Amino acid sequence: MGFELSKKQLFIFDLDGTLVDAYRAIDKSLNFARLKLGYTCVSFEEVKKNIGNGDKNFVAVFFPKKDLNQALAIYRVHHKKSLKKYAKLRPCARMLLNKLKRKKKLVALATNRPSYYTNIVITSLGIKKYFDFVLCADEIKSLKPNPRILQIILEKFQIEKHEAVYSGDMKVDMETAKKAGVDGVFINGGSSSLSEVKAYKNKKIVGLLRNFFK
């Protein structure tokens, strides 16, 4: 596409499915809540494809409204431990973050994952130090694809739209980038497939993080 990543000054990342693989942690917590409330387990694939819109919306997919509040509370308590046990970095994520900092680039995180759990993930995996700014949707009460999360980050660093790029693994991330007027990088292998994001023309596609700049 018509932009060069090496010329960008601000690199904004989604978290789950992009830099971090927390699918197993999410699956464990969701199915723990399901069993606790008398429901059968759902498949890993079903869990994976519904991630990305905040934990309340995610849990709501798998429970009737009458059980939602109780299910969410069970899920959240379990998830504190599950993240520490099962979340892991995607291959070469640390290498990429290191490279960006060596190049003296600004690095930010923009995620729909609630701030409390985001902090658990980035602290336990030792990547918090790489981010110049972390912004979670619950802190601004605005979920992606609302572009406000990216707009706030751009304003914070006084960076023009063409100087920034947003990387994510989902259709919602590409939609957020489009609405914010910034270029997007689709990280393949996460929650959305290539076919789901083919309509977003102004993007680059990265299969492996080690090939981010290739």
Image (cartoon, rainbow, N blue to C red):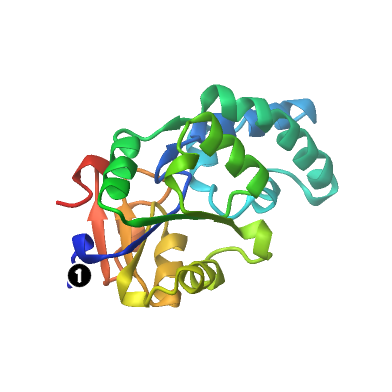
User: Which percent across, then down, holds residue 129?
Assistant: 46, 41
Label 1: few (<14), some (14–19) or many (≥20) C-alpha neighbours in 10 Å = some
Q: Secondary structure at mark 1?
A: loop
> In the image, what residue occupies the spot 26% across and 44% down?
99
User: Which percent across, then down, holds residue 88?
Assistant: 45, 29
Residue under pointer 1: 3
> In the image, what residue occupies the spot 50% across and 35% down?
23
Whether residue 40 is visible to the viewer of this picture, yes or no, is: no
Q: Front-most of 200 and 122?
A: 122
User: Which percent across, then down, holds residue 74?
Assistant: 77, 33
Q: Quadrant of the N terminus?
A: bottom left
Does 57 sit left or right of 162 as displayed? right
Q: Is residue 85 above or below residue 120?
A: above
Q: Is residue 200 above or below residue 138?
A: below
- Tell me the amino acid under the disc marked 1: Phe
Does 60 sit left or right of 83 as displayed? right
Check the image and name the residue furthest to the left: 214
> In the image, what residue occupies the spot 35% across and 51% down?
193
**In which quadrant of the rendered view does residue 137 lie?**
bottom right
User: Which percent across, then down, holds residue 95?
Assistant: 29, 37
Check the image and name the residue furthest to the top: 85
Whether residue 3 is visible to the viewer of this picture, yes or no, is: yes
Does 25 sit left or right of 12 as displayed? right
